[in-house]
Amino acid sequence: ETGVTQTPRHLVMGMTNKKSLKCEQHLGHNAMYWYKQSAKKPLELMFVYNFKEQTENNSVPSRFSPECPNSSHLFLHLHTLQPEDSALYLCASSPRGGKKYDQPQHFGDGTRLSIL
Amino acid sequence: GENVEQHPSTLSVQEGDSAVIKCTYSDSASNYFPWYKQELGKGPQLIIDIRSNVGEKKDQRIAVTLNKTAKHFSLHITETQPEDSAVYFCAASHFGNEKLTFGTGTRLTIIP
């Protein structure tokens, strides 16, 4: 059983819809990440939050809007998406601070997003 | 930035045989190298990692070796079992940098 929970597991939406992906971690970590996983491509880092502050935006289009209200929860708000945005969106968390910089990231099982 | 190349993209081995997956990295400052296993419908799960101050690490049937000079690291799975069938990803980062750079993955199939 994963310590990182993502909902929903599957989402189908039209290009004009607005939806949100949710991630919750129960591991006491203070860094959280959003990744995009497309077929035959490496995992692409999208956003990083440390202690609720965004520390990385990997040139992600503004139609993806992250929100991190606390160290345990992470959201990805979606609006006006394109067909090429169809992918598996993965959330991860890790400990941060002190000597914990090279601790592994723990992933959730992802949200499979399909854009019609 | 860092670039990680992973080979092969697909690998089939007979049950009981060994499997080896290789990755190369470009940034000599990288010093942390995790391996993840992803089963169908699941997220990546860490199976083993190695830091640059060691050359080899073993955990039961899984081992990872690191050659800093050549900038490559490898995953070794011995006595393979059907449940080892999955996609395996290597990754690299350096101390203090939260950005993991992933390889493109290897689909491993164990033939009963």
Image: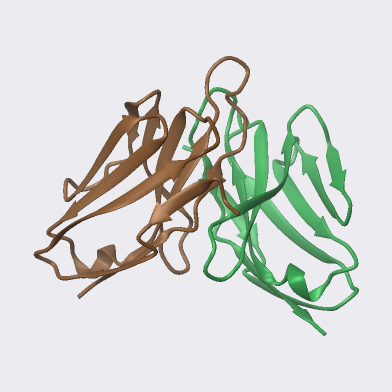
Q: Colour of chain B?
A: green
Considering every residue shown, the one lying at the far left of the view is A16
> Residue A55 vs residue B105: left or right?
left
Q: Which residue is drawn at 49% across and 52% down?
A: A108
Q: Which residue is drawn at 83% across and 36% down?
A: B55
Q: Is residue B30 above or below residue A7?
A: above
Q: Is residue B35 above or below residue A26?
A: below
- Where residue B51 sits: x, y (%)? 73, 32
> Residue B48 vs residue B36: left or right?
right
> Residue B85 vs residue B43: left or right?
right
- Where residue A114 sits: x, y (%)? 29, 71
- Where residue B79 sits: x, y (%)? 90, 67
Q: Residue at x 81, y 45 (%)?
A: B65
Q: In which quarter of the image is the C terminus of chain B?
A: bottom right
Of A91 and B17, which appears nearest the observer? A91
Quarter of the image for residue A57 reads: top left
Q: In this view, does B13 lie above or below B90?
A: below
Of A83 and A20, which appears nearest the observer? A20
- Where residue A64 sits: x, y (%)? 22, 49
Of B40 and B67, which appears nearest the observer? B40
Considering every residue shown, the one lying at the far top of the view is A98
Quarter of the image for residue B71 reads: top right
> Residue B112 vs residue B22: left or right?
right
Q: Chain A is drawn in which colour?
A: brown
Q: Residue at x 55, y 45 (%)?
A: A3
Of A12 and A48, which appears nearest the observer? A12
